[in-house]
Amino acid sequence: MAEAQLQQFLEKVRQLNAFVALSEADPAVREALAACSHHHEVVALARRHGFEIGRRWGESDAAPLSDGNLLAGPCPPPGQEQVSVLARGETWRLERIHSCQASSPPGFWYDQSEHEWVTLLQGSARIRLAPGDRQPPAGAGEPEGEVLELCRGDTLLIPAHRPHRVEATDGEPGSVWLALFWTGVCAG
């Protein structure tokens, strides 16, 4: 095994172990994990918490783009999104996210350990930010928070642990995001 492959394997094991530790320490994450019905849901759940566990043996860090164009490629099925890691470093990750009529599950709020900066390259989206840095209580009826209507070219900075959810994205050809995730200081 080449050293690069060994390091790739060890990093995936570290990410998996950290995700397992989080699921053992946080009952809400454990409950969400138990509700997953297939591999892709587990990978998406881990990613929402800042862990990248989806790469398979031998896959490179950067996903190839069709014709090198961020807007090329087929639209995912309605209600789905496709995530491609374009580049990564030790404390950051750049992703292309292609959403089609996607929304967060009812009652679900992202609460990431990473800061996230997004720009919408195509389409539109509606994002809800929870007030302050707390998640609205479960079963509280209509979700609280500020609703942002984003369109092509808009950007948004979401500090780590700022609960948020996707209320809606466009249907075909879908909404295409460029998202930068990082840990450490957030100067925004």
Image (tube, rainbow, N blue to C red):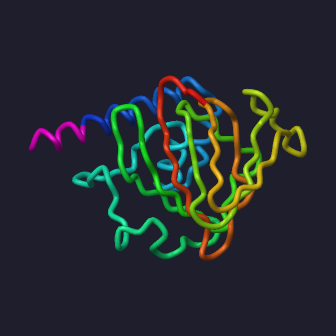
Residue at horizontal 56 percent and vertical 27 percent from the top: 187
Query: Is residue 148 a member of the stretch shown in magenta?
Result: no
Q: Is residue 17 above or below residue 179?
A: above
Which residue lies at the image location 51% right of the left edge and 28% below the top edge?
22
Q: Quadrant of residue 153?
A: bottom right
Q: Which residues are magenta?
A: 2-9
20 left or right of 7 in image = right
Decide: is 34 above or below 95.
above
Viewed as shown, does residue 132 lie left or right of 123? right
Q: Quadrant of the N terminus?
A: top left
86 or 105, nearer to the observer = 86
Hey, which quadrant is residue 45 in on the image? top right
What kind of secondary structure does the magenta stretch mostly adopt?
helix
Question: Residue 119 in the image: x percent, y percent?
Answer: 58, 52
Number of numbered discs? 0
Q: Position of residue 174 (x, y in %)?
A: 61, 70
x and y percentages locating residue 157 in the rendered image: 62, 39
Name the residue located 77 percent from the left edge and 28 percent from the top edge: 132
Compared with 24, 30 (above or below) is below
User: Which is nearer the eye, 24 or 110?
Assistant: 110
Instruction: Residue lying at the far left in this picture: please name it.
Output: 1
Residue 176 placement, left or right of 152: left
Can residue 8 be found in the magenta stretch? yes
Q: Position of residue 188 (x, y in %)?
A: 61, 30
Q: Residue at x 30, y 49 (%)?
A: 61
